Amino acid sequence: MLKSKTIAILFAVVVFSWLASGQVLDAAVPCESLVSLSLPNAAVASARTVAAGAFTPPSGNAADFKNLPPFCRVALTLKPSSDSDIRAEVWMPAEGWNGRFQGNGTAGMGGAIPFNALAASLRQGYATAASDTGHQGDSSYAIAHQEKVIDFAYRSFHETTVKAKAVIAAFYGNGPKFSYMDGCGTGAQYAQAELQRYPEDYNGIAITGFSNKSNHVFWQMWAWYAAHQDEASNIPPDKYKVLHNAVLQQCDLLDGIKDGVLEDPRQCKVDLTALQCKAGAGPNCLTAPQMETVRKIYAGPKNPRTGKQIFPPPYPGSELTWYRFTEPKPFALADDFFRYFVFKDANWDPKKRPINFDTDVALADSPQNGVVNAMDPDLSKFVGRGGKFLLYEGWSDTSIPPDRAIQYYKDVVAKLGTQKAKDSVRLFMVPGMAHCSAGEAHGTFDSLKVLEQWVENKKPPGEIVVSRINDGKAVRTRRLCQYPLVATYKGTGSTDDAANFVCKASAK
């Protein structure tokens, strides 16, 4: 108790001094002393200094972390409800902290702390935190633990953010000047919840690969499996290149450049009739059952009774990443969701009890499952306190095709008004970009740096230049344009130079 009081007194004195000076300080107290820090509905499990290159994650792979600087590692157990058991970690640079905090989400259905994400943030000088989303392993907890479902849906991220800031303030003597997050997939689900439920948590939020109706993402994933449930309709991995090349043959030049990337795939009205094998099978064609699978995938999941689209389909140009979802077994994340969240049956057999794309939609949309969604377009509280929201979506994302993100952006603009939205919310579509990765995109960019310039220096992103790097050199640069504009070639100069492109309205 005496040690806790000592830390609290020292913390108060240092915070007062920091507020007066405005300076970012190195550690105010030893890392190990944080084990006595008192936090509401939480406990510090451990606090220790990790020497440079000495961190080894529970799974091994220590070599991936050899270049980490020294840092203070604090492990927390968070219990916002009586049934909660959230394991979180806060990592803080031992020296050279940039004065910022980055919250990190997890991937898929959570269940483990994303150490690689923590390491990436630490290398850039951020104090950072992440959790296991409130459970370990698979989603079997969802059968009988609704409080844990809420933790997974959004609460674990918020609680980790709040507690991490308290730990950071205790360690350095001041909290972060600015807080950021960059989420994809499940991380984007948390980012959406932060924008809508907890607008005070972050100054800048970047999102990619997201849907504001997360529970419907799994219908899209299951539809891939439903499209090829017999051997004849299954598409071999080597045929996706054949399919993709056929799409490029018809649509690559629609943007005026033959570069293997569709700048705006909405323009591509592909007709693949000629791709069907004339007789039998062949290396450069698809059989009739395989072509039917392709048609179903391009159509996306629909209610068979009403014809209503359950989730948007992928766009032409995305075919190289289809293999992830068209294996003989159901995609693991979708299986997890329907098994544990929807049917609440660990022994569910999809062959004996197939998913009904009509009646089971309402079951999946129950209030208990709907907590994973973040539908509210009213971001007035977030933008009212100066928050900045950057969306960048890949046209070739097949895990979560981008149409719902585009519609959410339109809904936000309609709710806030055009000018207020322009000041605080921007969407950039990325040609060729897959889910949470570059894919066939022209290049990449640092979304956090864009946010920092926007939040801290009042420099909103008008256009973003992406770079494709080979052997340490930029071999291509291109412009990303604010939606709905599209990068358009001027007609002269290298097509690998962003300077030879301008942002114009799409021909769609």
Image (cartoon, grey):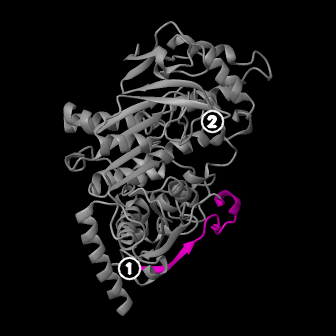
Disc 1 secondary structure class? loop
For label 1, the residue is: 82
Q: Nearer the viewer, residue 48 or 289?
A: 48
The span picked out in magenta is 43-66
> Does 259 sit above or below residue 188?
above
On whether residue 55 falls in the magenta region, the answer is yes
Establish if 213 lies above or below 167: above
Quarter of the figure with the C terminus = top left
Tell me which residue sits at (40%, 44%) in the image.
206
Relative image position of residue 39 (x, y in whole percent): 35, 78
**Quadrant of the rendered structure where residue 288 is?**
top right
Three-letter residue code for mark 1: Ser
> Where the N terminus falls, by quadrant?
bottom left
Numbered circle sitting on residue 322? 2
Q: Is residue 199 left or right of residue 231?
A: left
Most distant residue in the bottom direction: 2
